[in-house]
Image: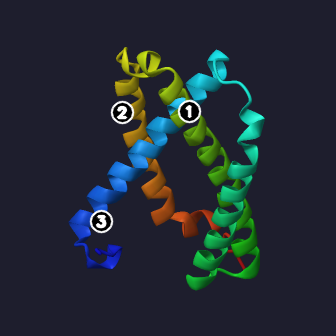
Amino acid sequence: MVSLPDLSFAEQTVLFVLVSSLVFTTSFVGGLGLLSGALVATQSRLPVYVLGMAVVFVASMFGLITYDADGVTAMLGSVGISLLGFVLLGLTGEGIVYAIRYPDRVFGSQLVIYFLAAGLIGTGLGYWVVSYWREFTARPATAE
């Protein structure tokens, strides 16, 4: 079995870009499905999305504390990350359901290519935010 640390930096980067772009693209498809009104009974899948949010909360808490975030930053960061995770998990899940139920609407037009392009842009923005998140959470220096 290949674990992530066994991959080279280039392989990890390619894997990250592929997975992240696929998730973003699928979430855009989910947004389309919800906005079009084609998806019904989404509340039946809500408990799964809430469970996913809880997993994201715990993982982000451990991750932020591991990288020496203070208590307030760890809590607020984990809440923000878990809310973002909930939205992303929900839209991605709905995107999968929409693509399975209506493949002609998803793959029958060039819209999925635009969603893939937007997913790649979202991946770049997400990587930038993760790389520079401390700049956003740092308290400004006060003049004395």
Q: CB of mark 2 within 8 Å of CB of mark 3? A: no
Image position, residue 91 (x, y; %):
60, 38
- Circle 2: is it few (<14), some (14-19), or many (20+) Cα within 10 Å? some
Q: Amino acid at mark 1?
A: Val
Cα distance, mark 3 to mark 1? 28 Å
Quadrant for residue 55, please give it.
Answer: bottom right
Q: Is residue 100 visible?
A: yes
20 vs 102, nearest the viewer: 102
Residue linked to disc 2: 117
Quadrant for residue 74, please give it.
Answer: bottom right
From this view, report whether residue 122 is shown above or below residue 57: above
Which residue is located at x 60 percent, y 62 percent? 136
Residue linked to disc 3: 12
Which residue is located at x 42 percent, y 50 percent? 20
Which residue is located at x 52 percent, y 36 percent? 96
Cα distance, mark 2 to mark 1? 21 Å
The image's mark for residue 97 is: 1
Question: At numbered mark 1, what does the secondary structure look like: helix, strand or loop?
Answer: helix
The quarter of the rendered structure image containing the N terminus is: bottom left
In the picture, measured across the screen, residue 72 lies left or right of residue 3, that is: right
Q: Amino acid at mark 2?
A: Ala
